[in-house]
Image: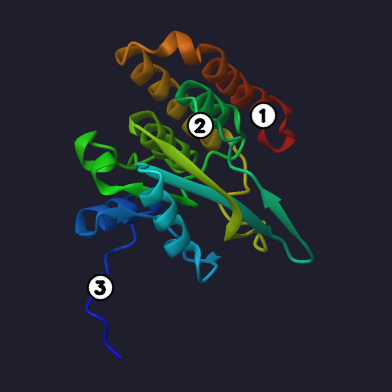
Amino acid sequence: ANDSRVRVFHKENGGVCSARNWGLEKSQGEWIIFIDSDDWISGSMLLDMYEKAISEKSDLAYCDLKMVFNEHTEVLHIAKYDSIKVNMLNNFIKSTFGTVVGMLAKRRLYESNQVHFPIGVKFCEDFYVAVRLMLFSEKICYIPTAYYCYNRQNEGSASYSFSQAHSDSVQWVFMDTIDLFQKEGIYTEYAESLSWRLLKSKQDLVLEKSTY
């Protein structure tokens, strides 16, 4: 049966960032969430996260992820929750899996702060957006349940390959984020975490034998 709440749009393939920005442009709801085409979620995820966000008067809610491999699954915590904003954001920055999936955010966080996915960036684009959503949120809440199933059965996809281009994208994202935090006048509170992530991206490139 047709459901007026569901709308489908088609566009020429321009990459993940282009598709997500298109979705943001076409969306009309008060809340935004992203689900990748090869992943899936539990049936109660959206309602549970929405009710949690409403009850705690939060701008953003996030949950755990279930990493689905060919022969086993693992629960991944995006970041350790802390009710103190600075601690929460530092925990997220230091997390090695800074993703926007598993996050339900108010639409105004995107619109009021001009948050979008960076066109041309093919790696770490999730962190680019997620760290901004957290930064501009007045309150963040967390549900310790792995509602989101992250498909890792295709280890050859772009998410798991590493190259010089990968490293360049990651380093650009962190340098741009450092620039944002400096402009916001809050860099000193996050300098250690951001510097560590930037150095780690360089270390990953050096240790990856396929890149040389």
User: Residue 95 falls in which quadrant of the image?
Assistant: top right
Q: Foreground residue, 93 or 15?
A: 93
Residue designated by label 2: 170
User: At numbered mark 3, what does the secondary structure look like: helix, strand or loop?
Assistant: loop
Image point (43%, 38%), residue name? 140
Residue 36 in view (yes/no): no
Disc 3 to disc 2, C-alpha distance: 33 Å
Residue designated by label 3: 7
Quarter of the rendering occupied by the C terminus: top right
Tell me the crowding category of disc 3: few under 14, some 14 to 19, or many 20 or more residues within 10 angstroms, Cα based.
few
User: At numbered mark 2, what does the secondary structure look like: helix, strand or loop?
Assistant: helix
Sequence order check, earlier mark of 3 and 1: 3
- Please, what is the three-letter code of the amino acid marked with disc 2? Val
- Please, what is the three-letter code of the amino acid marked with disc 1? Asp
Residue 137 percent coordinates (x, y): 35, 34
Q: Nearer the viewer, mark 3 or mark 2?
A: 3
Residue designated by label 1: 204
Q: Foreground residue, 85 or 205?
A: 85
Disc 3 to disc 1, C-alpha distance: 41 Å
Sequence order check, earlier mark of 3 and 2: 3
